[in-house]
Image (cartoon, rainbow, N blue to C red):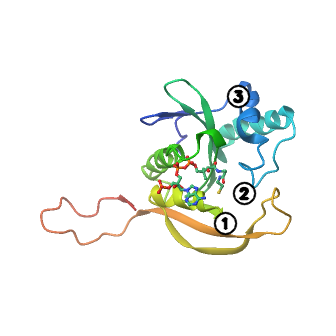
Amino acid sequence: MTNPPEILETKRLRLRKPVLEDADEIFRQYAQDAEVTKYVSWRAHRNVAETSKYLRMCIASWGNGKGYHWVIERRKDSQLLGMISARVDSHKWELGYVLARAYWGRGYMTESLRAVIQWALKQTEIHRVWAVCDVNNVGSARVMENAGMKREGVLRRWSIHPNVGDAPRDSYCYSIIKDLERRPLSKGAGQSGKRKAHV
Ligand SMILES: CC(C)(COP(=O)(O)OP(=O)(O)OC[C@H]1O[C@@H](n2cnc3c(N)ncnc32)[C@H](O)[C@@H]1OP(=O)(O)O)[C@@H](O)C(=O)NCCC(=O)NCCS
């Protein structure tokens, strides 16, 4: 498995491997925020020590190939905005993401998600990039659609969102896949059989 780049850059953003020194800013910006953490799979952090512990896990996972976490920062001023993560399961990558409330609604997460998807689907061994979101998390569903992912359906009682309650909740499942089918090409199109991202 190819290790992903520790830095992925987009027009406005830099996705980079986290460092422990990010803990204060992550805690302050979003990890303790009840609104931001409403539909995530982890409990809102009560103190920066919890954020540090989480970050240690994020950094360590780069070494075992089980997952990759990038801090999202703005290129122009290095402002930390959020995080995007990939969980690796063979040819399948499951993504998760979070953005500090002050930066919502500016297209930052769509830009981040596109960057990770584009990199991932160029890799020979990654065939499916997918994610789930709570059926009430309208913004997250929209981000996935804007990044080219397709809704596959509802996974009933799939995700526990501990900041909402203990009972598992229904989630939308979205994916984008590498299309390996050889499709008939329209006249004038190039060679057949080329791999392409199916959006
Ligand atoms: C979901 C989240 C990542 C979106 O990040 P963002 O950078 O604000 O997203 P973008 O600006 O790229 O796109 C947001 C899209 O959702 C839409 N949207 C956001 N909130 C919405 C709402 N409540 N109802 C309808 N549409 C909504 C926006 O209009 C935009 O779509 P458009 O460009 O087609 O108009 C961010 O709100 C967040 O971090 N939320 C908390 C954590 C979370 O829920 N993470 C996902 C767990 S699955």
Badge 2 marks a residue whose secondary structure is loop
- Image coordinates for residue 95, horizontal then vertical, percent: 60, 53
Tag 2: Cα neighbours inside 10 Å, few (<14), some, or many (≥20)? many
* Residue situated furthest left in the rendering: 188
Tag 3: Cα neighbours inside 10 Å, few (<14), some, or many (≥20)? some
Disc 3 marks which residue? 22
Amino acid type, callout 2: Tyr
Which quadrant of the view contains residue 38? bottom right
Amino acid type, callout 1: Asn
Residue 39, above or below 1: below
Disc 1 marks which residue? 136
**Which residue shows up at 82% across the image and 58% down it?**
162
Residue 39 numbered tag: 2
Q: Is mark 2 within 8 Å of ligand 1?
A: yes
- Image coordinates for residue 29, horizontal then vertical, percent: 71, 35
Whether pointer 3 and pointer 1 mark residues with C-beta atoms closer than 8 Å, the reply is: no
Badge 1 marks a residue whose secondary structure is loop
Gap between marks 2 and 3 measured at Cα: 22 Å
Asked whether, in this view, residue 180 is left or right of residue 3, the answer is: left
